[in-house]
Structure formats: C-alpha cells, structure tokens
Image (cartoon, rainbow, N blue to C red):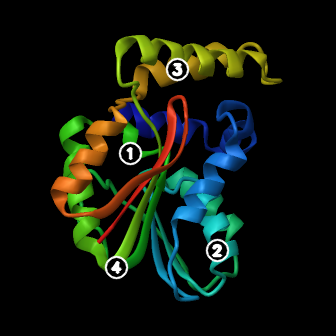
Amino acid sequence: MDEVHAAFDAGASDYDAQRRWIIPEIEAFYGAAVWAAAWPGEAPAILDIGAGTGLLSALLLQRYPGASMTLLDNSEKMLEIAKKRFAGRSRVQFLVADYRYEPLPGHYNLITSALSIHHLEREEKYALYRRVFEALTPGGIFVNAEEVKGESAWQQERNFAYWDAFVNKSPLPDEKKPEIIGRRDRLDQIERLSVQMKWLTEIGFVDVDVVYKNRPFAVFTGRK
C-alpha cells in the first residue's frame, strides 16, 4: 500500500486530465455509480472512500446539492486537489486516513467508492466491506465503482487486452502508456465480481446487484 500511496501522490496533478483516456466509457461508468446512489432525501450524509481528487464526489454533489460530504483518502496530495475543487463548500469535509485499518468516521446514508478498493488485499477488502455496513444508517446504500477480475483466466486476459487497446489508442503521450499499464499490473489487487457480491451478502447487505459492467469495470451495490 505504501507504493500505491506514493504512486498517487506523484500522479495527483495529472489524475483528472488522464481519467478520460484510462477508463473506457467513463461517463457511463461514473453515471451508473451516481444512479445507484439513490437516497430519497435531498441532503444525505455521504462518505466517499478513496475519494482522490473528488471526481465521484463532485457528481454526487450535483445530484444532492444539500448533501454533507466526507472525502476520505490516504493521499494528502490528492485531497489537496479536491479541496481546491470544493473551495467554499462548507458541508464538504476532508480526511486523510488509511481506510484499511482505521474506523470509518460517523454514520452515513450513502457510502461510495470509485477505483480505490481494488488496491487492498483480499482480507482487507472484506474487512472494509464489514466496516462500511456498520457505518451505514438503516436503508443506507453502498456503491462501489471498481476494477474487477475476470471470472476465468481466459476472460481476464480478454478484459485486459480490451483495456490495453483503449489506452494505447488514446491521445496520451506514448511514454505514458506503458507506465499506466505497468502501474495497473504492479499495484492492483483485483478480485472477481462474483466473490465480492457474495461477500456483501454474507455481511448482511440486501438488494446486492450489478448496475453496470464493461469488461474489467463494474459498478455494484448493496443496501443495509
């Protein structure tokens, strides 16, 4: 995780600009996450785990302008960019913490995450999902927009070939492309979607479902 932390600190300034050329169908991917975060009130309490520069948080605040939002990340430099994005928003808080181990602060109607939890080891993912469940209010919803492992080695190979082709065709500088693909292969600890959905059900989530999937990118959700 230290290497992950260092990588995201180093790439914080370029993070937002590169997302469109790293994540295929980025609008549909993030749009599905916002759609899945369905709270009946107008001002939910939201925790965004691994919030980074605040991409998902910003979209959620467009949907719920009155929400109280907490952005949690272990990269202080990423959150510094998020602070600039949300300057003047008094209901937005920032917390630098290692969410592998530390308790999630408070209770929330919505807990979300985008492209972060896949950096955790298998046991750490499961433990975090348990803490997410405990931190949700009754009826609260967890939404994870995530990179997932193929259900077979054959499918995983095809998923990554699709992703590699997307990155290699992008207008990113040629010297950046091997770095991005190599960082993925070096830092990501992906898990099968079916396994993670089973975990959520075991922990006590109901209405566990997949609301979006494009090869290795999935948005899945559960409700307390």
Disc ID at residue 61: 2
Q: Is mark 3 on a helix, strand or loop?
A: helix
Above/below status of 150 relative to 158:
below
Q: What element carries label 2?
A: helix
Above/below status of 84 relative to 180:
below
Ranked by sequence position, the earlier of labels 4 and 1 is: 1
Q: What element carries label 4?
A: strand
Residue 194 is situated, as x and y percent measured from the top left of the image, at 31, 38
Ranked by sequence position, the earlier of labels 1 and 2 is: 2
Disc ID at residue 117: 1
| Along the viewing direction, whichever of 46 and 80 lies nearer the viewer | 46
Amino acid type of disc 3? Asn
> Pointer 3: what residue?
159
Ranked by sequence position, the earlier of labels 3 and 4 is: 4
Amino acid type of disc 4? Gly
Ranked by sequence position, the earlier of labels 2 and 3 is: 2
Q: Which of marks 4 and 2 is in front?
A: 4
Q: How far apart are marks 1 and 2 (CA)?
A: 21 Å
> Pointer 4: what residue?
139
Does residue 101 appear in the picture of this structure? no
201 vs 211, left or right, is: left
Amino acid type of disc 2? Leu
| Along the viewing direction, whichever of 44 and 78 lies nearer the viewer | 44
Tell which residue pokes out farthest to the right in this image.
171
Q: Distance between the residues labelled 4 and 1?
A: 22 Å
Does residue 25 appear in the picture of this structure? yes
16 vs 57, left or right, is: right
